[in-house]
Image (tube, rainbow, N blue to C red):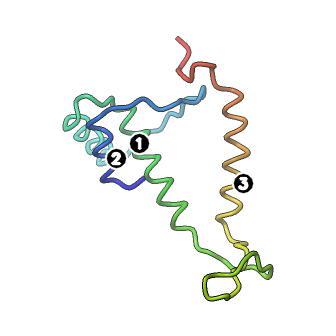
Amino acid sequence: MKFKPLLDRWKKQSAPVLTAEEYAVRLPLDDAARLRALAELFPGCALEGIITDLLHASLDEIAASMPYEPGPKVISRDEQGDPVYEDVGMTPRFVEATRRIKKTLEAERPANGRRPA
């Protein structure tokens, strides 16, 4: 998710599915001030939701920035018939670890996807 669509989403306010686990972090003062400024600009968005969305956008950017590292195995051919090699870099490991951990988190999540009262 890019940041422009994120700003548009905050204007509309939708509720994501949440994990059972909560994450507590302490922020540098500048970051905390900027978060509160965003909450002030978008009063319909909870600070927690803004943090969640920013983290999501950042994780998407990190995943997109992982470099492709060609391995020895040809997995397909491009439009010109040139070989496309499997990626042996961080991306496939990140994707696989994400899938595996997501299954675990889904099993731990309450049935309605909301935080327990």
Q: Which mark is residue 61?
A: none
- The image shows residue 83, relative to residue 22, as above or below, that is below
Label number found at residue 96: 3
Give the residue at the far right of this rendering.
73
C-alpha distance separating marks 2 and 1 = 7 Å
| Among numbered discs 2 and 3, the one appearing first in the sequence | 2
Residue placed at 38% from the left, 31% from the top?
Answer: 14
Element class at badge 1: helix
Upstream in sequence: badge 2 or badge 1: 2
* Residue density around tag 2, few if under 14, some if 14–19, many if 20 or more, within 10 Å: some
Kind of residue indicated by mark 3: Glu
The residue that disc 1 covers is 53
Mark nearest the camera among 2 and 1 is 2
Q: Residue at 27% of width from left, 45% of height from top? A: 34
* Residue in the image at 34% along x and 47% along y: 6
Dot 2 lies on which element? helix
Question: Which residue is labeled 2 in the image?
Answer: 6
| Amino acid type of the residue tagged 2 in the rendering | Leu
x then y, percent, for residue 29: 31, 44
Q: Real-space Cα distance between discs 2 and 3?
A: 26 Å
